[in-house]
Image: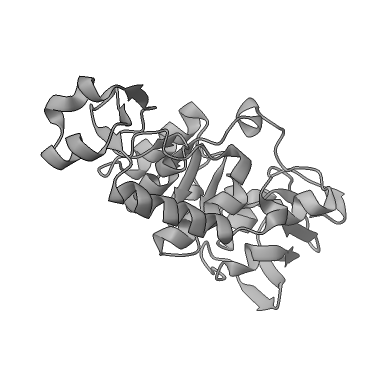
Amino acid sequence: MAWATVVLHGDLNDFPLSHRRGGVAHRRGDVVHRRFVGRPAVKDLLEALGIPHPEIAAITVNGAPAGFDHRLDDGARVEVWPAAEAAEWGLVPVLPAAPEDLADPRFVVDAHLGRLATYLRMLGFDTWYRNDADDDQLAAVAAAEGRILLTRDRGLLKRSVVRRGAYLRSDQPVEQLVEVALRFGPVDRWRPFGRCLRCNTLLVSVSREEVLHRLQPLTRIYYDDFRRCPGCGAIYWKGSHHARMERLVDRVRASIPRSAER
C-alpha cells in the first residue's frame, strides 16, 4: 500500500474530503495524506478525493509540473492549484491552451440552474440551457461546442469529456452569477441586454411600428425603443422590468473587486 501527500491551494479546500474508491485519506488543514494501490494517474487520485478536474488549473508532483495523466509513486508530493492562484504564480497550466480559452466565454448550464442561465444571458453571455437536459446531454454539449459547464453536481464535472467547468459553491443565483463573473466573465466582456433571456438569440432593433400590434395600450404610449428576438419573437423594451435588471447588473458589478474587472 502506498501513500501520497496532497497540498490543496486556494478554494480547492472548499471540497469536502471523499473516502470513495477504497482509499483512505487524512486531512490536516490544506494537506491531505491519501493511500492508494498501484500507480494511479494524478487525475484519478484527485477526483477520488472529491475534486473535479475542471477545478484544477495547475499540478506539480515532487516540485515539477505534471499533467493529469502523470503516474504516482509511493511518497509522491502533489500540489494542486485553482485558476486564480495558478495565474498569480505563473504556473504551467495542466492543460494546453485551446482556441475557446481566448474567446468570449460560452456556457452550458445545468438544468437545475435556470435563474443563473437567465442572468448570464442578461449580461450578454452565450448560454446554452434546457430545463429537461440530462447529464449526458450537458456533458456532450460542453465537449462538442467548447462550452464551460456550470453545475453543483461534482459527478457531472468529473466526466472525462468535460474540459472546462465550475462547481458553483453558492446555491443562490445572484451569488452564483458573481462567482461566474469573477472566474470567467470580466466586466469588459459584458454586453448587457443584447441577448434573449428566453432562447439565447441575439436581439435586433425594430421600429415601434413593426411591433405595434403586439403591444399593450400603455406600452404603445410610453415607449419607442424596442428590440425583438429573431429566434422566439419575444419583444423587449425599457420598462420597469428593465430597470430592475439594470439594478441587478449594478449590484453584481459592485461585488467584483476593481482589480478583477479586466
Residue 232 at x, y = what percent?
Answer: 24, 27
Residue drawn at 49 percent across, 59 percent down: 251
Q: Name above or below for residue 113 compared with residue 219.
A: below
Position of the C terminus, as image quadrant, is top right
Residue 106 at x, y = what percent?
Answer: 50, 35
Task: Examine the image and state in which quarter residue 228 appears.
Answer: top left
Q: How many numbered marks have been drawn onto this rendered protein structure? A: 0
In the displayed structure, does residue 60 sit left or right of residue 220? right
Farthest right residue in view = 63
Farthest bottom residue in view = 28
- Work out whether residue 39 can be spotted: no
Residue drawn at 27 percent across, 37 percent down: 223
In this rendered view, identify the residue nearer to me: 175 or 206: 206
Position of the N terminus, as image quadrant, is bottom right
- Work out whether residue 196 can be spotted: yes
Farthest front residue in view = 221
Q: Name above or below for residue 232 compared with residue 139.
A: above
Q: Name above or below for residue 182 compared with residue 122.
A: below
In this rendered view, identify the residue nearer to me: 140 or 188: 188
Q: Name above or below for residue 6 compared with residue 162.
A: below
Q: Which colour scheme is used?
A: one colour
Task: Examine the image and state in which quarter residue 213 appears.
Answer: top left
Residue 13 at x, y = what percent?
Answer: 64, 68
In the displayed structure, does residue 10 sit left or right of residue 19? right
Residue drawn at 69 percent across, 48 percent down: 57
Residue 197 at x, y = what percent?
Answer: 33, 39
Residue drawn at 72 percent across, 43 percent down: 94
